Image (cartoon, rainbow, N blue to C red):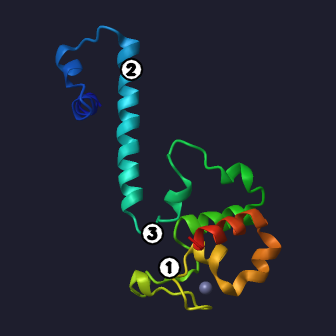
Amino acid sequence: MVSRVRTCLFQHGFGYVWQNQYVHNEPLFIQQLKQRLKDEYLQTWNISVNQSSILCDYRLCQSSPFDIEKYVSVLDLRKFRRAYVTFGMGASKLEVHTGRYNNTPANNRLCRLCHMEVEDAFHFLLKCSSFIDLREKLIPRKYTDTLRSINSL
Ligand SMILES: [Zn+2]
């Protein structure tokens, strides 16, 4: 246990505390150590999420591992939360996700319906021509209008 404390202090830049066996201001030291551990965890989390090809949709909606994801309060039905997590974690039935299992190159994971683009969550939800009718019924116009104006640039 003692060696773990020593290792932790040295790993996170507080080796002088171990060597001196003393801190001048204990509450301040504890606050600084907590902040350092939190910052280093956040940095590691950011690197791993940003380098993961699987979590490409997840990083769009989650900016910190310390925040409660908004979907928890916004999506009140369990099946919607489950679908959202499935998209975010790269475990959906979309080609962008299933293509990993049969080694299809990422740029060849085309939509099975329109064959125009890679079938990812953005294409499936907001762009695929096969779902225009459903989109008009289910997604408020302000979102689809914004997308149309972006696409026309
Ligand atoms: Zn499509």
Rate crowding at label 1 as few (under 14), some (14 to 19) or many (20 or more) other CA atoms within 10 Å: many
Q: Are marks 3 and 2 in contact (CB under 8 Å)?
A: no
Report the image quarter containing ligand 1: bottom right
User: Marks 1/3: CA distance?
Assistant: 9 Å
Residue that mark 2 sits on: 30
Q: Position of residue 43 (x, y in %)?
A: 36, 45
Farthest top residue in view: 24
Q: Residue at x 40, y 28 (%)?
A: 34
Q: 22 or 56, which lies in front?
A: 56
Check disc 2 and give the amino acid type.
Ile
Quadrant of residue 130 within the rendered picture: bottom right
State which tag comes first along the sequence, 3 or 2: 2
Measured from the top left, where is residue 11 in percent x and y?
23, 35
Please identify the quadrant where the N terminus is shown. top left
The kind of secondary structure element at disc 1 is: helix
- Eyeballing the image, is 84 above or below 107? above
Q: Amino acid at mark 3?
A: Ile
Residue 54 circle label: 3
* Label disc, if present, on residue 96 of the rendered structure: 1
- Where's residue 64, x and y in %? 50, 46
CA gap between label 3 and label 2 equals: 36 Å
Q: At x 19% / y 20%, what residue is drawn? A: 16
Mark 2 or 1, nearer chain start: 2
In the picture as drawn, the residue positioned furthest to the left comes out as 19
97 or 25: nearer the eye? 97
